[in-house]
Image (spheres, rainbow, N blue to C red):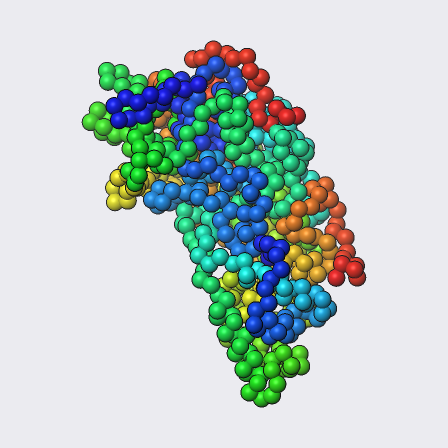
Amino acid sequence: MAAATASPPRRPPNATILDALGDAVLPAELGADGVSRAVVEFQRWMDGYRPGAEANHGYGTGKIEHLPADPRPRWRSQLAALDADARRNGPSFSALPRDRRQALVRAALQNERGDALPNPLLARHVALALLAHFYDSPAATDLCYDAQIGRQQCRPLAAQRQQPVALGRKGR
Amino acid sequence: MTFVSHQGRAEVIESDICIIGSGITAAVIAEKLAEERETRIVVVEAGDDTVPLADRAAHRGRFVAYGESPWGRDHIDGMTADGIQSRSMQVGGLAMHWGGVTPRFSPEDFRVKSLFGVGHDWPVTYEELDPFYDEAERRIGVAGEQGPPELDPRSGPFPMPPLPLTYNLDLLKRWTDSAGIAMWSQPSAKNSVAYGGRAVCCRNDTCAPVCPVGAKYSPDFTWNALRASRRVELVPRTLVRRLVVEDGSNRIARAEAVRRDRGGANGSRVDFRARTFVVAAGYAWSPHLLLLSRSERFPNGIANRSGMVGKYMTGHRNVFAFVKLPLRLYPGMNEQHSLVTKQFMRPAKLDRYVRHDLRVWESNVGRRPRLRGDDGAVLLGDELMADWRRRSAEGTARVRAYYDVIPDRESALTLNESAKNAYGDPQPKLTFRDSPESLALRAHTEESIKALFQRMARAGNGEILRSGVDDFQDHPAGGCRMGDDPASSVVDSHGRAHDHENLFVVGAPTSVSGGCANATLTFLAVALRQAAEIGREWGIGNRESKGTGNRDQ
């Protein structure tokens, strides 16, 4: 999802844990900078959320619905829980090697039903929210297809005739 | 332009023509009348002004990021209905949210009884509407491709070149060609070139619900121009509650309304007096207003001597499928643009009636990233991306066919006495119902379409991932159907009420049937033909008659 504002996100108390979570669940091929960028975008997206705002009510329904309650307190608790789980047997979550962080996340997500990535606002776990937010981004689609598609971004109309060009190393 | 006075406690606004509603139909007829006739026009809209174009990019950003409504206060608490298609009561109406898809009906849609022995003919033919289709396309700005003339008859060119096919759609067109189906670029009210002072489409791909650059037509552009030129007075936040018939005649004397933004919770009473009243409030609120206007003299509402107000609500149903194809597609190039054909709307000979449109889009169904692999294990890091890449090597097409539902007389809008708005007026209740002959055809129709989808999949060495039927009736219309016989219709083909010489109902509610394609352009063509009759009473003005779309060309 695109960020709604461009202001730099504030660093929450558990930012280090979130960074470590991003490194554990996002593709390593993003590189350290790419992972960091994705985590910053996720933090910015969380900061911009307005719980209870009126949801889009597009064609096909007369219902007026509102966005869900603020998930951030729950997600903060889950970050703290990941850290607490790590500390039970050793160092902090951030200090664990990647495979052990992934093992903790897998355990936390083991009971998630279905295989679809949810709307990030509805994610029951912060790791799932971070994954869903990243994989819903135009950058993730471009990476998957190795192509400059630029989904939902302003692009020249005439260029849609051509096959999207490959990202190339620089684009990644 | 208009005369405002206070008679007793009521504010009175006088004009020549009072148009009730400010949706897309109201916009094009107000523009036409203002350009072609010397007349004072007042437009009354229950809702607020809409979000200005300058704010839409920011609103879209929040829609994309969080799913927030991009349209602010676009509805009124308590003003809704069971069975309504959407909530959009604002300046510009439902077409502030629309997708901008503008096919024409085919000639057969207007003559199904004569040609196929089912349903009802319209009292107007495609050939009669053709110049008004042209005019509608010009006024709102339609980018379109001329299909094969035998499938896509039209007398004039589109005002804009077509939206180009995407790389994906080009591949999909080769696929449909191989299945023996001629498809072309879907006509759309989206700018393929600068038009009407508005920008070219830049594929933001959120046409519905919001175009952030104004490349998609929406009625606020017409209202902005008309208000700026002072050719039309638009009165927002004012709900018309009833039309009152003159004592001793059948003419409408006034529209009684309430200004919602004045006078506290009860609002402030305002009456609109005019020589001609035009109800342009869409498929739900138009028949609703006529029914609400009941009185001792007209206990069943006005324009309702036939008992047909609110009857024959109509629309079309759709059958859809997602087809897996061995094609490398790139979802996201322009997901809302599609291929279209009228091949199945124009059958030469039928053993049993079935007609439908057909559209094809790119899709990411079956190609989305997922949390679990085939073995059920949670995927993280590079595994998840690798799984997504593997499943994206092939493509998915979305296919959909609208088929016409022949409405039952009791497919109806009625007053719901148990649900009232803030002013005590009962709200509408809509119950869509197939006629018995339509019910009898339903399984045959849907199976025929699914068989077509199977044939298409085979032609592309693909397979159906899933298919289904959306049970609701899309692009709803009717409720004030037009006809030559006052015993079985509400208005004549020019929208004039059989019972009241100075009352017109225009656009969607006058439709006889829902056809089998997106219907907005047809509503506009019908309404522009009706506007020609509405304007006949006034002198021809000296203003240019080119439409909003051409003014800045």
Apparent side of residue A81 relative to residue B455 in the rendered image (left or right): left
> In the shown orientation, is residue B547 left or right of residue B481?
right
Residue B26 visible in the displayed image: yes
Q: Quadrant of the C terminus of chain B?
A: top right
Q: Quadrant of residue B208?
A: top right
Q: Quadrant of the N terminus of chain B?
A: top left
Q: Tell me if residue B148 can be seen.
A: no
The location of residue A169, given as percent across then percent down, is: 79, 61
Q: Residue at x 57, y 18 (%)?
A: B545
User: Vertically, is B150 above or below A70?
Assistant: above
Q: Position of residue A59 (x, y in %)?
A: 48, 45
Tell me where residue B314 appears, x and y as whole percent. 41, 37
Q: Is residue B68 left or right of residue B194?
A: left
Q: What residue sits 33% from the left and 21% below the top? A: B5
Instruction: Please identify the residue farthest to the left as the structure is shown.
Output: B296
Q: How many numbered circles does the render carry?
A: 0
Residue closest to the eye, B213 or B521: B213
Query: Residue A6: x percent and y percent?
Result: 62, 55
